[in-house]
Image: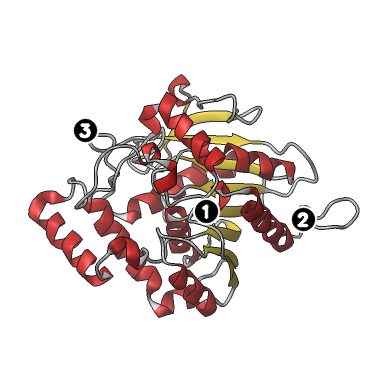
Amino acid sequence: MGQTASIPVISSGDAGLVTLTRNPVPSSPVVGVFGGYDGMPLRYARWEPTQGPRRGTICLFQGRGEFIEKYFETIADLRRRGFAVATLDWRGQGGSHRHLKNTLKGHIDDFAEYDKDLMRFMKEIVLPDCPPPYIALAHSMGGTILLRNSVLPGSWFERMVLTTPMIAIDQKRLTISSSVVRAYSEVAAVAGFSHALVHGGDDGPDQNAVFERNILTTDKERWSRNKGVVDVAPELGLGAPTVGWLRAAMRATAGISDPEFAKNVRVPGLLFAAGEDEIVSTRAIEEFGVRLKVGRTILIPPSRHEILQENDTVRQRFWAAFDAYMGITDDAGAIVA
């Protein structure tokens, strides 16, 4: 996986988690910041399981614009299943370092930066203090990062579960062909507009959208809960991506979409696609799943993009498949619901 100089974990009160009455922090967290590949502070949190038998550690990886607090419910669900949980805010979002002066712009120069931060997270936070085996649970952009890791020799992960991984951006969202979008991002970045917002984007936090116009979830309570976190802690919010982020994303997804890429995936995986997704391409996920040698795809037709933030019916379908895949049963031998 390559060698880098060790960067110590830093304890910081500023890395604390935001708690709401309807979104309480799961009990007994260990929270702090660690140095990313370039020493910039990235926020992390980890938890021990609340029930046995102990099954190892779920490494939980967010999508673009998300933050640790958004996954408190999921973290509690995993701990009850016997998993320790470790997670981080990717650079440029949540409580982690943001590169630009306007911190609401979602920016990255290259997905290789995420790759190197993943390495630091595993070496500094997970491997020293979290029990194996390690299973990745990643959403959207997090899925892109984990897929990039899955073709490398010596991956840390025994399995990966990916919800609506960003293998390709949904064509309806692009409005024009992906080749034109990629050309636009390449030319604009070279012309010096890498830090500019994408055409039509603004720097208002995504969570400030009106529920009736949101395309992430059909569940108003969970949508309101996530918006409530940003209302009390606006520094966790994020606006539209920059041209630089778009260029990096188009390059990353082009690599994953190559027909040969899936054949080289080494980590067994369970991929979930959402039938009503307007963010990433459901068709691209299904086609990728067909090419996988060590994985399969499950389609949840009524779900929008954020399966883990969806209504109870959708979430129950996810957890039923997750439990079956992980071999989780109750004392009577039945799969946990």
Q: What residue do we see at 42% from left, 79% from top? A: 260
Q: How many C-alpha atoms fall within 10 Å of the one at disc 1: few (<14), some, or many (≥20)?
A: many
Q: State whether residue 207 is above or below residue 144.
A: above
The residue where tag 1 is placed is: 138
Local SS, label 1: strand
The residue where tag 3 is placed is: 101
Who is closer to the viewer here, 157 or 140?
140
Of labels 2 and 3, earlier in sequence is 3
Local SS, label 3: loop
Who is closer to the viewer here, 289 or 113?
289
Q: Are marks 2 and 1 in contact (CB under 8 Å)?
A: no
Give percent across and percent down for residue 16.
49, 24
Local SS, label 2: loop
Q: What residue do we see at 70% from left, 63% from top? A: 325
Report, in whole angstroms, how far the alpha carbon at label 2 lies from the one at label 1.
Answer: 19 Å
* Display coloring: secondary structure
Who is closer to the viewer here, 202 or 323?
202
The residue where tag 2 is placed is: 328
Residue flagged by tag 2: what amino acid is it?
Ile
Residue flagged by tag 3: what amino acid is it?
Lys
Q: Are marks 2 and 3 in contact (CB under 8 Å)?
A: no
Q: Where on the picture, by quarter, is residue 182?
A: bottom left
Give percent across and percent down for residue 97.
34, 35
Of labels 2 and 1, earlier in sequence is 1
Report, in whole angstroms, how far the alpha carbon at label 3 lies from the one at label 1.
Answer: 28 Å
Q: State whether residue 239 is above or below residue 188.
A: above
Give percent across and percent down for residue 165.
47, 60
